[in-house]
């Protein structure tokens, strides 16, 4: 379980990648990852390609993030979900709140 | 020691010659006529033949012809012993393959001089022949090795032929082995990855790095890793593997399964272009980083480029072979011409581009590997995978956790790992995790620790909640959570019972459980993922049934 963040070369996209387990153990580091978002950032990508597990605490963390940064960026995308995680997001109606790809 | 064969029907000549030569340290064999001589030559490694002309059974002329015919591999000098001195006889001797003459009566000095001279020639010829054989051996060996390597290379580029709708590419190596490398693979969720690489130089030395690099690429795509992580891994590999002056300029691209977005790591290749169907450049993607294999682990640069695409878009990648192709006047093909050609036709193909390039080069020798890739940004479906068969063995698994274990272990994660190893369950591990995590955390947070989810509604309540949880957990002294699991292969079901020592909690959150709140989602998720969820009356036990089919 770990979290890494990366800015794209042009500084417009912030990618937060979560490996393994996305749950309340990441509460602090996840909040820190988007705490000081730079002015040039227009898009935040939560990359779940290496996320195997998530539970409702992760959903809470995602909503918290959205509340905090939605006025600063134009897109928040949740990308590369494995099918079962995508289903969890859909059941929770997250496809209405986030761009899920 | 040189071995001389003396062929003469007259004993006197034979004895005279052999005595003279033995004095000089030569090894001697003797024959009375040509036929005898051929027999000796079959058996003994003769270096020089002294051959009389007029002999019974087989004369010198016929013998010389046969010797030259049968022993042609290494120069075997024939020196005629003759008393004939007419021009015609000399000519005949030369005609049948004679190399020199000694006149009777024999003069020591001349005999020695001639034998020595021919010995030297014979030695040289022997050496040349040995080298020729060695060369042939190495040549055959190399050919065989090339065949094997070619076979391995072809096998290592397993996926190139797939994805015909998405990919059009042309690889023209400058020699047998390509120092350019083009790899293609699809991740489990359907994303399409391409890697175009250009190793320093060309030929086998350049191509060899493609083998380990391709293994890393395929393995990491299979895990669905990000392009920069793949780049980083190949970078370390090549950094450790290649000699200092060798590296691999590369672009690694990931097209999402929706076909709508691309992320790319660009290290050292010429500009890539995002073009429309007409070949108009929509975006130029410049290389951002140094080539792979130069920087060590800590210096490596992870930044990628993200951009959105659609079905009308194509990504054009090329190695420097194309822009550095030159014509007879040493003029480079260059980026401008490349861009012009992309625009010269709707949906231009790589074949069109190469035709243009060849016209430009007009017969000039190809200096470097030329590789072009056109990626059509179309959606693609994940590859269908055969499902692992379900285990037919029914089992129960039970855990009782006391306060100490609750504090120190991560039972949900561990149990999911155990269950994942059972045949057929691995594909369901995310759902199993969700069910167990929700039920266990409910039991722990609300049952054992007695936390109230309403805290989450306050400003910053979410974080406050987890702070409180941490504190409560730290001071937990006496508690018990029991997890019971049952796997029924007959009905393909998993049953879970999670029971805690707490006072129970309200399993039916009130109206506040709408999806905008930071809590309450867990319970409804459980009900969606599980076939059935039931709570006991006091709220300290939940029973779930999950269908695997």
Image: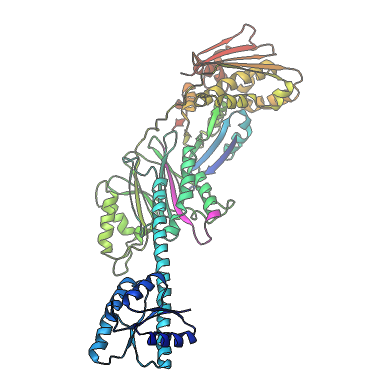
Residue B25: give x, y in percent of width and height: 49, 83
On screen, residue B236 versus residue B86, left or right, reads right
Residue B263: give x, y in percent of width and height: 44, 43
Residue A34: give x, y in percent of width and height: 57, 37
Q: What stretch is highlighted in magenta?
A: B239-256
Question: Is residue B253 located in the magenta-colored stretch of the structure?
Answer: yes
Q: How is the model colour-coded?
A: rainbow
Residue sitting at x 33%, y 78%: B33
Looking at the image, residue B73 lies above or below residue B180: below
Residue sitting at x 40%, y 81%: B121
On screen, residue B15 versus residue B338, left or right, reads right
Most extreme residue toward the top is B537
Q: In the rendered view of the protein, which quadrant contains the C terminus of chain A?
A: top left
On screen, residue B392 versus residue B190, left or right, reads right
Q: Can residue B7 be seen in this view?
A: yes
Looking at the image, residue B209 lies above or below residue A94: below
Question: Is residue A18 located in the magenta-colored stretch of the structure?
Answer: no
Depth order, front residue of B487/B104: B104
Residue B10, quarter of the rendered image: bottom left
Residue sitting at x 36%, y 63%: B367
Depth order, front residue of B49/A1: B49
Q: Can residue A38 be seen in this view?
A: no
Residue sitting at x 53%, y 34%: A69
Depth order, front residue of B327/A98: B327
On screen, residue B455 versus residue B227, left or right, reads right
Residue B509, quarter of the rendered image: top right
Residue B398, quarter of the rendered image: top right
């Amino acid at each position: 379980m770990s979290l890494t963040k990366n800015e794209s070369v042009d500084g417009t996209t912030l990618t937060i990648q979560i490996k393994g387990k996305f749950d309340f153990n990441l509460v602090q580091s996840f909040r820190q990852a988007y705490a000081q978002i730079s002015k040039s950032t227009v898009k935040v990508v939560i990359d779940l390609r290496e996320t195997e597990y998530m539970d409702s605490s992760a959903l809470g963390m995602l909503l918290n993030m959205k509340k905090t940064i939605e006025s600063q960026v134009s897109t928040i995308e949740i990308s590369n979900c494995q099918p079962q995680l995508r289903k969890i997001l859909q059941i929770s109606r997250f496809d209405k709140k986030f761009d899920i790809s | 020691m040189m071995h001389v064969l003396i062929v003469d029907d007259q004993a006197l000549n034979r004895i005279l010659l052999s005595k003279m030569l033995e004095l000089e340290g030569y090894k001697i064999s003797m024959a009375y006529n040509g036929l005898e001589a051929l027999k000796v030559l079959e058996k003994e490694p003769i270096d020089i033949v002294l051959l009389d002309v007029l002999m019974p059974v087989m004369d010198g002329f016929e013998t010389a012809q046969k010797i030259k015919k049968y022993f042609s591999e290494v120069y075997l000098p024939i020196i005629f012993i003759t008393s004939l001195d007419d021009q015609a006889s000399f000519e005949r001797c030369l005609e049948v393959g004679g190399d020199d003459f000694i006149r009777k009566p024999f003069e020591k000095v001349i005999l020695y001089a001639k034998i020595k001279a021919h010995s030297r020639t014979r030695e040289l010829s022997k050496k040349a022949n040995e080298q020729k054989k060695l060369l042939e051996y190495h040549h055959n060996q190399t050919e065989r090795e090339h065949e094997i390597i070619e076979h391995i290379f072809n096998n290592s580029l397993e996926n190139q032929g797939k994805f015909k709708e998405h990919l059009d590419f042309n690889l023209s190596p400058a020699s047998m082995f390509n120092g350019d490398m083009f790899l293609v693979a699809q991740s489990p969720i359907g994303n399409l990855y391409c890697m175009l690489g250009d190793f320093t130089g060309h030929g086998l030395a350049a191509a060899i790095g493609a083998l380990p690099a391709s293994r890393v690429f395929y393995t990491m795509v299979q895990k669905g890793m990000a392009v920069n992580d793949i780049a980083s891994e190949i970078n370390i590999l090549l950094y450790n593997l290649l000699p200092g002056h060798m590296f691999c300029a590369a672009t690694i691209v990931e097209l999402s399964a929706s076909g709508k977005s691309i992320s790319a790591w660009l290290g050292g290749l010429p500009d890539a272009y995002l073009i429309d169907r007409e070949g108009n450049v929509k975006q130029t993607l410049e290389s951002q980083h140094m080539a792979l294999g130069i920087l060590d682990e800590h210096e490596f640069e992870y930044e990628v480029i993200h951009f959105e695409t659609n079905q009308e878009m194509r990504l054009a990648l090329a190695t420097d072979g194309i822009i550095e192709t030159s014509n007879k006047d040493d003029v480079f093909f260059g980026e401008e011409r490349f861009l012009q050609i992309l625009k010269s036709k709707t949906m231009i193909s790589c074949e069109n581009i190469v035709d243009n390039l060849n016209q430009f080069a007009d017969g000039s020798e190809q200096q470097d590997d030329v590789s072009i890739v056109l990626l059509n940004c179309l959606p693609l479906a994940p590859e269908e995978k055969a499902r692992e068969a379900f285990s037919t063995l029914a089992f129960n698994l039970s855990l009782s956790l006391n306060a100490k274990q609750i504090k120190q272990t991560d039972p949900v994660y561990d149990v999911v790992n155990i269950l994942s190893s059972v045949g057929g369950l691995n594909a369901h591990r995310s759902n199993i995790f969700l069910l167990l995590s929700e039920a266990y955390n409910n039991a722990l947070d609300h049952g054992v620790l007695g936390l109230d989810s309403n805290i989450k509604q306050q400003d910053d309540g979410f974080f406050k909640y987890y702070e409180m949880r941490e504190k409560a957990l730290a001071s937990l002294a006496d508690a018990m959570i029991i997890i019971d699991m049952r796997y029924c292969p007959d009905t393909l079901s998993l049953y879970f019972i999670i029971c805690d020592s707490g006072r129970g909690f309200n399993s039916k959150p009130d109206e506040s459980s709408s999806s905008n709140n930071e809590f309450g989602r867990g319970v409804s998720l459980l009900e969606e993922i599980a076939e059935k969820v039931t709570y006991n009356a006091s709220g300290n036990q939940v029973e779930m049934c999950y269908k695997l089919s």
